[in-house]
Image (spheres, grey):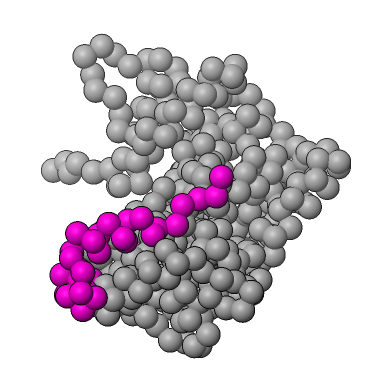
């Protein structure tokens, strides 16, 4: 009796990739048939490669950039590399038994740091060292579709396996990639986890993403600010990787933040958005944040204008600054009035009617004063 042998998930995935390549790269999709299911960002990258005149059979030379450009790249990314090194060391432990290895690139795909390399066979080691060298250009124009080029182009975590690479010569690699963002929200590079002819490990996307967030958090903690605000939702205990981080200057304007803070405060990436003041985010006086910074390890509940509340632990940043109202800083009467009203609202836990009764004014006046006393950006 004959028995049918069903394809394994790995064989099915390989067949889907091969079908997608025939359809999107070779243009061989028969009429009336549906396209092979493949991530849209992969087909976008394939299309860009084809439009650039590249063909899958071409040889790939993993060339380093010029010495002058490497010097400039190294200097520009010094802070990024220093922030990444502890994370790369932790990654080496997590990846120890997988034979994958970490690579850090700048925003253009040039390698600026490489983590510990695993023990590999001679052939695999040669393939690994093709790309795991500081200064090698791994951008999409140089090596075609890869997790590095895709993560930088689409600015999202990705997983790329063997034949999903554009060039035949890079089909031996499997890689997870996650973009890296500066405290101002600009993409400054990417973190890549690569294996050579290794078993598919799509769960590495999570590891790459978590590691990228750890690097970003270090960048926020090290950037110059007067106050560094650690944010979490009340009642939830979170680790450093899930903590929102927000930097403020002496006047209360946002100097930087991490991805978690931008999500919690429902704010877009800061790059190119113009000045943003703490008064646009928090429904309490700026002086209360400076007061909290003087009390080490004290968390306060901070009301947002949306009606939500966050738990905040405030500390002085890299550059200390006097709080509003301190010696040498004289608040205006309108600011003092607004500060008193916001404090009353805070003590009433956001209940405007209760705050109005305590102050002996109407609710409408409370709302009007709160609106007009919010700080506006300087001209």
Taking the image as shown, residue 166 lies to the left or right of residue 201, namely right
Toward the top, the furthest residue is: 31
Above or below residue 65? Residue 284 is below
- What's the magenta bit mostly, secondary-structure-wise? helix
Image location (x, y in percent) of residue 5 = 24, 43
Answer left or right for 35 relative to 53. Answer: left
Q: Is residue 371 magenta?
A: yes
Query: Where residue 266 sits: x, y (%)?
Result: 34, 54
Q: Nearer the viewer, residue 59 or 82?
A: 82
Can you tell which quarter of the image residue 136 is in?
Answer: top right
Above-or-below relation of 335 to 24: below
Q: Which residues are magenta?
A: 350-379
Q: Nearer the viewer, residue 84 or 3?
A: 84
Is 240 placed left or right of 368 in the picture? right
Residue 59, above or below 272: above
Q: Residue at x 62, y 54 (%)?
A: 103
Task: Name the residue rendered at 37%, 15% in the picture.
Answer: 28
Q: Quadrant of the C terminus?
A: top right
Q: How many marks?
A: 0
Q: Is residue 122 visible?
A: no
- Residue 254: x percent and y percent? 51, 58
Work out which residue is located at the far left of the displayed protein and give it.
1
- Screen quadrant of the N terminus: top left
141 relative to 199, above or below: above
> In percent of the image, x 42 and y 28: which residue is there?
43
Q: Nearer the viewer, residue 227 or 285?
A: 285
| x 61%, y 79%: residue | 327
* Any part of residue 113 in sight: yes
Q: Is residue 244 magenta?
A: no
- Residue 316 image point, x, y percent: 57, 77
């Amino acid at each position: 009796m004959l028995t049918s042998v069903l394809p394994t998930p790995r064989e099915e995935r390989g067949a889907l990739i091969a079908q997608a390549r025939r359809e999107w790269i070779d243009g061989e999709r028969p009429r009336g048939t549906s396209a092979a299911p493949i991530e849209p960002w992969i087909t976008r990258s394939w299309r860009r490669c084809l439009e650039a005149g590249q063909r899958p059979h071409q040889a790939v030379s993993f060339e380093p950039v010029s010495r002058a450009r490497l010097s400039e790249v190294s200097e520009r990314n010094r802070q990024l590399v220093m922030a990444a090194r502890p994370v790369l060391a932790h990654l080496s432990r997590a990846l120890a038994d997988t034979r994958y290895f970490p690579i850090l690139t700048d925003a253009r795909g040039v390698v600026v740091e490489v983590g510990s390399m695993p023990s590999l066979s001679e052939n695999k080691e040669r393939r690994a060292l093709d790309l795991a060298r500081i200064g090698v250009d791994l951008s999409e124009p140089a090596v075609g579709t890869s997790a590095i080029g895709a993560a930088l182009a689409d600015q999202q975590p990705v997983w790329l396996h063997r034949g999903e690479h554009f060039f035949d010569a890079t089909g031996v690699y499997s890689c997870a990639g996650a973009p890296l963002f500066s405290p101002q929200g600009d993409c400054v590079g990417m973190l890549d986890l690569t294996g050579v002819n290794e078993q598919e490990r799509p769960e590495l996307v999570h590891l790459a993403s978590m590691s990228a967030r750890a690097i970003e958090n270090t960048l926020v903690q090290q950037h110059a600010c007067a106050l560094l605000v650690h944010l979490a939702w009340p009642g939830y205990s979170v680790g450093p990787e899930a903590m929102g981080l927000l930097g403020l200057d002496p006047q209360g304007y946002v100097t930087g933040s991490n991805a978690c803070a931008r999500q919690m405060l429902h704010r877009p990436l800061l790059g190119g958005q113009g000045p943003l003041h703490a008064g646009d985010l928090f429904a309490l006086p700026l002086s209360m944040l400076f007061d909290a910074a003087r009390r080490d390890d004290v968390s306060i509940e901070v009301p947002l204008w949306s009606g939500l509340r966050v738990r905040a632990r405030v500390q002085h940043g890299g550059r200390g600054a006097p709080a509003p109202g301190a010696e040498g800083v004289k608040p205006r009467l309108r600011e003092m009035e607004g500060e008193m009203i916001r404090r009353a609202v805070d003590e009433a836990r956001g209940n405007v009617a209760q705050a109005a009764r305590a102050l002996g004014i109407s609710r409408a006046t409370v709302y009007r004063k709160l609106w007009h006393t919010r700080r506006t950006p300087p001209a």
